[in-house]
Amino acid sequence: MVSPRENFLLAVNHKEPYWLPCPLFDGSAISIQHGLIERRSSGLDDWGVRWELKDQRSDSFPTCHPLESPDMVDDYPMPSPYEPKIIEKALESASKADRENAILIGDNGWGLF
C-alpha cells in the first residue's frame, strides 16, 4: 500500500493513483501558513490595506488600498519574508509535519491584491 503522499505524487505526475487524492480527508498534503496578517475585521493589515467591518452580520472588506495605480508597485515596501513573525510560523508548522505521509504546500494567502 502506498502512503497518502506517494498517492498524491502519482496523481500530480499524471500516473495512475490508487485513489483520488483529497488532502482535506486523506492527509496527503499539509498547508503551511505564514505569519502575515492579511485580513482583519478593521484597521490596516501587513500589506497596508485598510479593512472595515460595516455590519456585524457580515465579514469585513477592504476600503483603502495602498497602491493608487500599477505604476506604484515598484516603490511599494513589500513585507520581508524574513521577518521573524512571518517565517517562524511557517518553519514551526513545517517542522511538525509528517513528511513521510504528506507533502507540504505553501499557502501564500490573500497577498497585496
Image (spheres, helix red, strand yellow):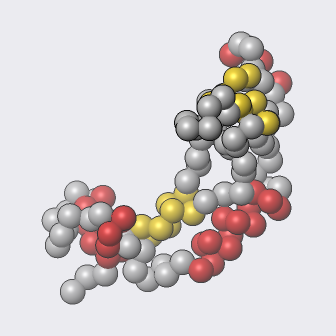
Figure quadrant of the C terminus: top right
User: Could you tell me which residue is drawn at 28 percent across and 59 percent down?
Assistant: 13
Whether residue 52 is situated above or below residue 90 in the rendered picture: above
Answer whether residue 46 is visible to the viewer in this image: yes
Answer whether residue 74 is visible to the viewer in this image: no
Which of the 4 quarters of the picture holds residue 32? bottom right
Question: Is 98 on the left or on the right of 12, as rendered?
Answer: right
Image coords of residue 11 (percent x, y):
25, 61
User: Could you tell me which residue is drawn at 55 percent across and 57 percent down?
Assistant: 106
Nearer to the camera, 20 or 60: 60
Q: How many marks?
A: 0
Nearer to the camera, 65 or 59: 59
Whether residue 98 is situated above or below residue 74 in the rendered picture: below
Which of the 4 quarters of the picture holds residue 90? bottom right
Image coords of residue 99 (percent x, y):
48, 79
User: Could you tell me which residue is drawn at 49 percent across and 81 percent down?
Assistant: 98
Image coords of residue 82 (percent x, y):
80, 56
Which residue appears farthest toward the bottom when viewing the image?
1
Image coords of residue 27 (percent x, y):
38, 73
User: Could you tell me which residue is drawn at 71 percent across and 57 percent down?
Assistant: 35
Which of the 4 quarters of the picture holds residue 62? top right
Figure quadrant of the N terminus: bottom left
